[in-house]
Amino acid sequence: MLFNSLNFAVFLPIVFILYWFVTNKNLKLQNILLLVSSYFFYACWDWRFMFLLIFSTVLDYYTGIKMAESKNEGVKKFWFWLSISINLGFLGVFKYYNFFAESFTDLLTNFGLQVNPWTLKVILPVGISFYTFHGLSYVIDIYKNRIPAEKNFVQYAVFVSFFPLLVAGPIERATHLLPQIKVKRTFDYDKAVDGLRQILWGLFKKIVIADQCAVYANLIFNDAGHQSGSNLFLGALFFTFQIYGDFSGYSDIALGTARLFGIELLRNFAFPYFSRDIAEFWRRWHISLSTWFRDYLYIPLGGSKGGMWMKIRNTFIIFLVSGFWHGANWTFIAWGLLNALYIMPSIIFNTNRVNLEIVAKGKYFPSVKDFCSIVITFLLTVFAWIFFRASSIGSAFAYVKEMFSKSFFTFPTNMPYTALFFIIFFMVIEWFGREEEYALNKFGFKWPKILRQGFYMLLITAIFLFSTKEQQFIYFQF
Amino acid sequence: MKKFIKSILIFGIAFFLLDKFFIFFIITSAEKEVDKRLELVINGKINKEIVVFGSSRGARNIIASEIEKETGYSAYNLSYPGSNIEFHEFAIRSLLKFNKIPKVILLSVDYPMAFLPDSVLNFRLDRLYPLVKYSYINNELIARGEKNLLMSHLFALSRMNKYIINLKQKKFMPKDTVYSDGSMPISFQKPNENWDKAKTIKKYNSLKELKIKREAFQKIITMCKENNIRLILISPPLLDSMDSEFKARLKLLTSNTIEILECDSQNPIYKDKNYYYDKTHLNTKGALIFTKEITLYLKNTKR
């Protein structure tokens, strides 16, 4: 069930009504309803993978209790590593096995050895990377004595599989979400309206921006061999907005939906394309994943405490793992590596925490210096996305080579003006709303109510006009 | 909670009323179109004996008026640049539903992408949306998962898409002029075309074929058989050489029961760029020669 589908438009009000009108007096019932609806939501993708989700949930729940009960460090360690191995094992089998098998075969072929690898013909269970990371963070936190084990299975299961975040995040932490699940939620009008507004903005990003950009990005990337340099640049630009609109749109819908149920999820995006350097970009892009890697990988590896070389090594590890997390393809690893290289100067010169605040706070326009920094950072990002989008490393290099040829200076053929118009419109709103949690949050609050409502209707009209077949969200494949 | 539900209801009703203004675009969009061929089909105005279907290669390489002149049969071209075989199936289905059954259908088959995944050739939704006032078109969009039955009856906006929002009368572009016979020949050459011939012929890989495209092709064959229409598959010339595997594949898919008209590969004209608009489409000069080849075939194999 996609967020941008009619099924979800029916599913959401039904759960909402049951939640606030039928189960509102009893926390236990509210949580059971959330769990049942979340499992139903997940089963709509493929009911067979429900068992994997339930197994993973039971395993981590049981591990948590066993670790908390254990007085013996060895036993605690046993349960910890059992859970980690099984969780990563599932991820390895379903997501990475074929990649390793094929890469190994390619390697042997290069040495003149012909082998027939045993590959798995399985589809990737949707959301596996996300719910596995939920479970991992929970188990690690208990092992490190940061949180107590959750005794109530339903509450823990809701934490893992709450439907707005189940298939593509944000990657939640037990410390943030579990306390909200444990207390009774009361309806808050302002929160609910805010939730709807964020859903509207998310749908606009997905349907009007991402899906439109996808048409042109696909057209250009799939036929890259016959495109001029300027067209290829346009293709990369469209993909840049496609992936942002798609993923941040998804996150907005997830956050807005959760808010309708009185639950606040972690923020996932904070206007990353207005970043002044790559370090800032990574503090603003897919925040829940970046902070996950920071807390559960970078810091345990020693973080920045072991001197410059340690810092550089750990940064490379983080970006390579982050790239690999996105998918079993060398292109994602190259994308991670490229970002690691981008961020290196700021690591070496210790300038990675210069731009902590949003750009031009309290002002209409940025300074010339900030503007130039934004443009440079943005262009570096566009370049990196080529590797993310390309089907192979070879095609990524071919794309880049042709893009920087003489034909880069020709006018692109078939300029999609409508899509460009909407991108500009979108970025203007993003700019003026950049100090808020999401762009539409307080946008137009000083206008007369009728004008603001009219603006929302305009957005809905655009969503209707641009909606076609339900388009998958990119991050579902991760 | 009451306040929340009340606000949603008021907003919903206001939007529902606003939506009704968009009926104007649904009614007027067909008039703004310059390529009226599909509307003529739906209105039963294409009652011809020979009809050409295909993508841009069919539209540019085959001149229906020449066929008419040479064979004496009435002819029309319903080829749409950028369209795939699923669209051809839809166009043939629509023609048969609303018009007299033609005697001959000439289907230009695109080498090599007719059955392969391809982003250049699509189901031309932009040709359907301006005609969404016709239930037949709306139902087709619903059947294709583009629109929802209930929503398209509730909201005018749900029937529409961005192609409809247009107040100006559209005009023909030099490259996309549809002549009175439905053909779209081009008299000039594409600027900046790279005329270098491909050094190798890419091997056709039938394993990559899409089932949905093969099914559309089979539907075309079935429709023609059921309606006693003579179906002729046409493989238009290309400046670069073709892989013979594709031709073998076509024969296999048709169980060798459908006529396949291949252009005369020995004809030196088809290796001369002066007869081409670009490497995959003939210009008018080339199209006249190719059409002559077709008419000769039709005359020689008259049934």
Image: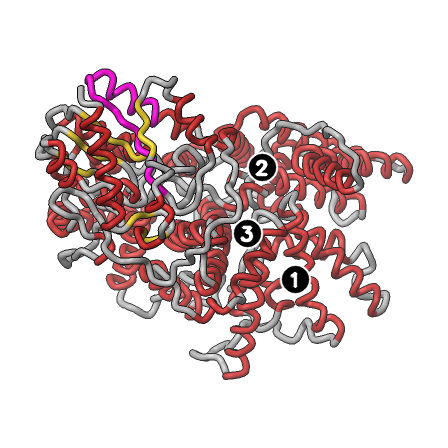
Secondary structure under the numbered disc 3 in the rendered image: helix
The chain containing the residue under callout 2 comes to A
Q: Report the mark closest to the observer, 3 or 2.
A: 3
Q: Earlier in the sequence, mark 2 or mark 1?
A: 2
Residue identifier under label 3: A389
Label 2: which secondary element: helix
Q: What residue range appears in magenta?
A: B216-237
Task: Please identify the residue farthest to the bottom as the structure is shown.
Answer: A368
Q: Residue at x 81, y 38 (%)?
A: A80
Image quarter where the N terminus of chain A lies is: top left
Which residue is label 1 attached to? Answer: A339
Q: Position of residue B102 (x, y in %)?
A: 15, 26
User: To which residue does mark 2 refer?
Assistant: A161
Left or right of B13, for residue A140: right
Relative image position of residue A201 (x, y in whole percent):
40, 55
Amino acid type of the residue that numbered disc 1 sits on in the rendered structure = Asn
Closer-to-camera residue (B4/B36): B36
Q: How far is mark 2 from mark 1, CA to CA?
A: 31 Å
Query: Residue A60, how many percent across, how many down?
Result: 72, 35
Question: Label 2: few (<14), some or many (≥20) within 10 Å?
Answer: many
